[in-house]
Image (tube, rainbow, N blue to C red):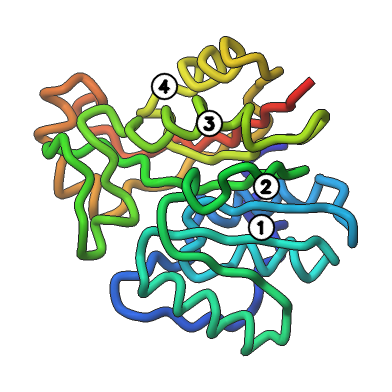
Amino acid sequence: MSSTALTSGRLPGRLLALPNVYRPQADTRLLAAALAHEELGPRTDVLEIGTGTGALALHAARRGAAVTAVDVSWSAVVTARMNALLHRVPLRVLHGDFAVRTADRRFDLVVSNPPYVPAPGARLPSRGPERAWDAGHDGRTVIDRICATAPALLRPGGALLMVHSGMCGPQTTVDRLTEAGLSAEVTAKASVPWGPVLRSRRAWLEQQGLAGEAEQWEELVVIRAQNL
């Protein structure tokens, strides 16, 4: 799969979004394109971690899967529930920490577009739009947690699909998922222009060695990991 996958992710045409809720962008579309290659049906249990507007959860539910979506933001939870009603698609949307809300449950597929933007602040924000993208100094605070938790979330043969920036170290993600007992690889890539958040942090990102001088393009990757 290449950058052409950005145009093949079939997301719902109309989506509502309350303030501070992340709207679908290039990373969402790239992950939707990867999701389109997964076999889904009425007996497929899907979990989305960090659902935002619910776009990816709805994408899976429209194909017949039983989908549970989780988000730490109440605004995102309400937004996803509204969009499920708008599109008349059954969707279970839960508020809170994904590991807590799904304790003792296993899924055939876990999908996530987690916060992954490197940020000057070490702690994850607890409010505001930055909550959807800030993820600590290296952008891996949430990614690493998903890597560590994935084996307990997946049924035998189940798979994780996760998208994040190349700044966060895709090979590190693959290695950590492999160390956790999964078979992992990068299955899709795309290059997109830097958005306003990265542009506003250019000097800091360059100082941290996370971006080259005058860099203007960000690589996005989708990583697929399977529970053998």
Quadrant assignment for the C terminus: top right
Residue 68: x %, y % from top left: 64, 60
Instruction: Mark 2: give few (<14), some (14-19) or many (20+) Cα within 10 Å.
Output: few
Disc 1 element:
helix
Label 2 vs 4, first from the N-terminus: 2
Q: Are marks 3 and 1 in contact (CB under 8 Å)?
A: no
Q: Which amino acid type is shown beneath numbered disc 3?
A: Thr
Q: Which residue is mark 3?
A: 149
Q: Are marks 2 and 1 in contact (CB under 8 Å)?
A: yes
Residue 102: x %, y % from top left: 57, 49
Q: Is residue 108 left or right of residue 177?
A: right
Q: Which amino acid type is shown beneath numbered disc 2?
A: Thr
What's the mark number on residue 125? Answer: none
Q: Relative to the observer, which residue lies in front, 166 or 217? A: 166
Disc 1 vs disc 4: which is toward the camera?
Answer: 4
As drawn, 20 above or below 153: below
How many angstroms separate mark 2 from mark 4 (CA)?
Answer: 22 Å
Q: Residue at (61%, 13%) from the top-left corner?
A: 178
Q: Relative to the observer, which residue lies in front, 195 or 100? A: 100
The quarter holding residue 123 reads top left
Q: Is residue 207 left or right of residue 216?
A: left
Q: Which residue is mark 1?
A: 7
Instruction: Mark 4: give few (<14), some (14-19) or many (20+) Cα within 10 Å.
Output: some
How many angstroms separate mark 2 from mark 1 (CA)?
Answer: 6 Å
Q: Residue at (28%, 33%) from the top-left corner?
A: 215
Disc 2 element:
helix
Label 2 vs 3, first from the N-terminus: 2
How many angstroms separate mark 3 from mark 1 (CA)?
Answer: 31 Å
What's the mark number on residue 169? Answer: 4
Label 1 vs 4, first from the N-terminus: 1
Q: Which amino acid type is shown beneath numbered disc 1?
A: Thr
Q: Which residue is mark 2?
A: 4
